[in-house]
Amino acid sequence: MNISSRFAVAIHILAMLELNKKGISTSDHIAESVSTNPVVIRRIVGMLSKSGLVEVKPGVAGAKLSKPPAEITLLQIYQAVQVVQEDALFGMHEQPDSQCTVGKHIQASIFPVFSAAQKAMENTLQEVTLQHIVEDICASARQQT
């Protein structure tokens, strides 16, 4: 099972908004790049707008970043699209057999490990900005020309 693709799509959207500042980034245009439906793009842009990462003007095609890409971390994007709630990245099986020694104690034993793993991932996401992603995209594009 993967983390929802909303996270990757949100990063894609924000990178396009940054790299296409002079153009109009409509949901149709972005959806074509992502290979998805424009409705999906509008829904995710709505989440990004609600979290303050993008500005959208009603009735006007396109959106723009609300702050410089160096000030937007991947953790902020991850949280904006509500990928996973705190301490919920790893699911726990419900109601193990309380009469079994393992069943009775397994959740208390593995929950701290799962929680620490999620925190480590989130700490990594906090260290990477949208600017890093945009620079990497540009570097990759230059290498292919």
Image (cartoon, rainbow, N blue to C red):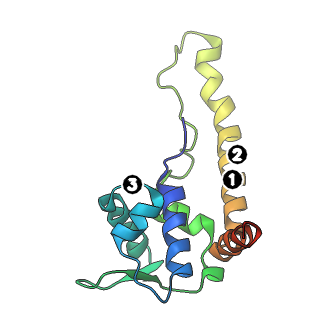
Judge depth for marks 3 and 2 and give the one in front. Answer: 3
Task: Check contact, mark 2 vs mark 1: CB within 8 A.
Answer: yes
Query: Distance from label 3 to label 1 (Cα)?
Result: 27 Å
Mark 3 nearby-residue class (10 Å; few <14, some 14–19, many ≥20) = some
Task: Give SS at disc 1.
Answer: helix
Query: Which badge, 3 or 1, comes first in the chain's sequence?
Result: 3
- Which residue lies under the disc numbered 3? 36
Picture residue at 53% right of the left edge, 65% below the top: 12
In the rendered view, tell whether residue 130 sits above or below residue 79: below
In the rendered view, tell whether residue 40 sits above or below residue 61: above
Q: Quadrant of the N terminus?
A: top right
Q: Residue furthest front?
A: 145
Query: Distance from label 3 to label 2 (Cα)?
Result: 31 Å
Picture residue at 51% right of the left edge, 62% below the top: 79
Residue 108 location in percent, x, y? 63, 31
Q: Quadrant of the C terminus?
A: bottom right
